[in-house]
Amino acid sequence: MSNYFSTLFTDPAALIGLLASLIVLVSMCFNTRTEKGELWMRLLNFIGSIISVIYGVILGPAGFGTVLLNGTLVFVNLFYLIKRR
């Protein structure tokens, strides 16, 4: 188990994936009933999804699902961010 955590915090790809996950997690904590809360949720989710796509590309073929899901979320969040204008 200790080998897992030492790899997690020393492997650059794992750190990128962890950062992306934390950003998406924080984005889900915003109150989307308010206009400001929805904006922050979409913006942080957009950034987290972009970082997740980068992480999936780094993983190569094993990251195909990550790239597909988060690439779609990038466009969904972008659509709603543009629609708000």
Image (cartoon, grey):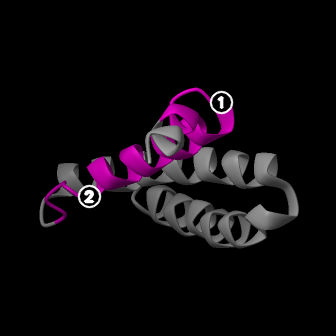
Specify the quadrant of the image occupied by residue 30: bottom left
Near mark 1 (Cα within 10 A), the count class, few <14, some 14-19 or many ≥20, is few
Q: Is residue 53 left or right of residue 38?
A: right
Q: Which residue is mark 1?
A: 12
- Across and down, in percent, residue 64 comes to 78, 68
Residue at numbered disc 2: 38
Which portion, as a residue range, is magenta?
Answer: 6-32
Task: Give the spatial CA distance, label 2 vs label 1.
Answer: 31 Å
Amino acid type assigned to the residue bearing label 2 in the image:
Glu
- Residue 23 lies, in percent from the top left, at 39, 44
Residue 48 drawn in magenta: no
Q: Taking 53 as reference, is 19 left or right?
A: left
**Amino acid at pointer 1:** Pro
* Residue 75: quarter of image: bottom right
Say whether disc 2 or disc 1 marks the residue closer to the N-terminus: 1
What's the residue at 67%, 38% (across, down)? 13
